[in-house]
Structures are given as structure tokens and as C-alpha cells.
Image (cartoon, rainbow, N blue to C red):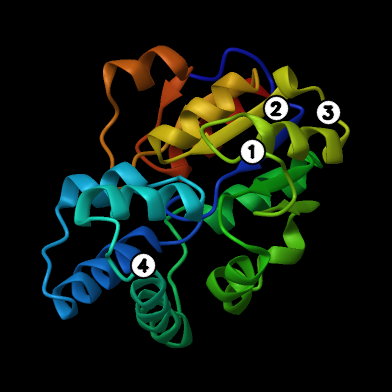
Amino acid sequence: MSLPRKPMAVVFDMDGLLCDTEVVYRDAMIATAAEHGHDMPMALFKSMIGLPAPAGDQKVLDHFGGDFPIAAFNARVLEHVEAACLAGIALKAGVVELLDHLDELALPRAIATSSSHRAVEAHLGHSGIIPRFHTVVARGDYARGKPNPDPFLTAAERLGVRPQDCLALEDSHNGVRAAAAAGMMTVMVPDLLDPTEEMQSLCVRIARDLHEVEAWIRAAA
């Protein structure tokens, strides 16, 4: 099995795709909600994966009520996350090997994330892989966040490659929707979210991990 066609560039999501941060945010939000006397339903957290921060905040307010102290909640979640970042966030399996192969092929690549540039540095800085990307598209670089296509369209424009010639790698449903809406050849690499029928229809492949993605790129080259 391989990809439908050879990609001319690769656009990566970050959280849950390059680094194991979704579980960090999950645990931080559950712990912080408990500190505020609330239970954070797993369904609520999963619905926020891949969304820009304001959209995620609105989901929390819709669930807990408009008087929920969202600013204090976010600040405390950030404290938990920063502690985890200081301890070191693990890269997902296959990241380094895939980047090595893209180097061999001289394929341009980008990160397109709903997180901030500060978060990119916090989550990936210790790993040393940020310089291996030709551009980083983060919150503030586009008008509309995922599931809108703007982050991926911005990445393609910066790389100088047509969106339809880009391979997009995503772990979240909202990210897959954004990449598919941009017209990219989209592969879902599930992390905390299982692939649904909708994801199957939007993706050219569902991968077990990035090692499998690397094998497909080799086969398409």
C-alpha cells in the first residue's frame, strides 16, 4: 500500500502528531476541573482537540456555565502543562525517522498548528526538531483556525507548493477536516481520537503511526 501520488511537500500538525501533548492537556484539564469542583467529561475534552483556544474555551463555558472562571482555569492548566514541558515532552514514534527520510528526498515541510508559537517552542524546543521544518504556521498566522482550511493553506503558500500537492498529517478530527478542506492529500494518524466514517471519507489513508507514513512515502517516491 502507498499514497495515491507522490507528495511535493508535507504539512504536519503538532500536538498528538509530532509530540505526545494531547495526553498532557487531557490530564491537566481533568485535574484543574477537579480543583474547581467539577468533573471534566472525556467527551468534552475530545471535542476540543484540534480547535483554536477561543473555540475550546467556548465549549468549556457551554458545558460548565457562563460564570465558570475560564481565565483562572486556563492559567492553572497552563501551569500543569508547563511543568510537563520542563520535564520533557516525548516525540511520537517515527518522527525522527520520517524527517530523516524527507531530508533524503529534499521535500519541504511545515508545521500547521492551532497552538501558539510559544507553545511550539515549549512543546518541541527541547527535541531540537523545529529547525528541521521550513516554516511553522501557528495561532496568529491565519484568520480562521481549524476546522477551517486557513492553517494548511498558509503553510502551502509559505512552502510554495500547491495544496493538492501537499501531504497533510493529522491526528484530530478538526485537523483532518481543515486539511481536507484545503484540498490536501490527508492522512490521519490517530492519537486520542478514533477514526470515524467521516474521517475515512476525508482521508486517503489512516495510518497506525508515522513509521507507516514513512513507508508509504517511500513507496510513492
Q: Is residue 140 left or right of residue 24?
A: right
The residues tagged by marks 1 and 3 sit, at their Cα atoms, a distance apart of 21 Å
Q: Amino acid at mark 4?
A: Ile
Q: Which residue is mark 4?
A: 70
Q: Earlier in the sequence, mark 4 or mark 1?
A: 4
* Name of the residue lying farthest toward the front: 67
Q: Which residue is mark 2?
A: 166
Q: Earlier in the sequence, mark 3 or mark 2?
A: 3
The residues tagged by marks 4 and 1 sit, at their Cα atoms, a distance apart of 22 Å
7 or 135: which is nearer to us? 135
Quarter of the view holding residue 143: top right
89 or 150: which is nearer to us? 150
Q: Which residue is mark 3?
A: 161
Quarter of the image where the N terminus is located: top left
Q: Earlier in the sequence, mark 3 or mark 4?
A: 4
Quarter of the view holding residue 22: bottom left
Q: Which residue is mark 1?
A: 144
Q: Is residue 183 above or below residue 143?
A: above
189 or 116: which is nearer to us? 116
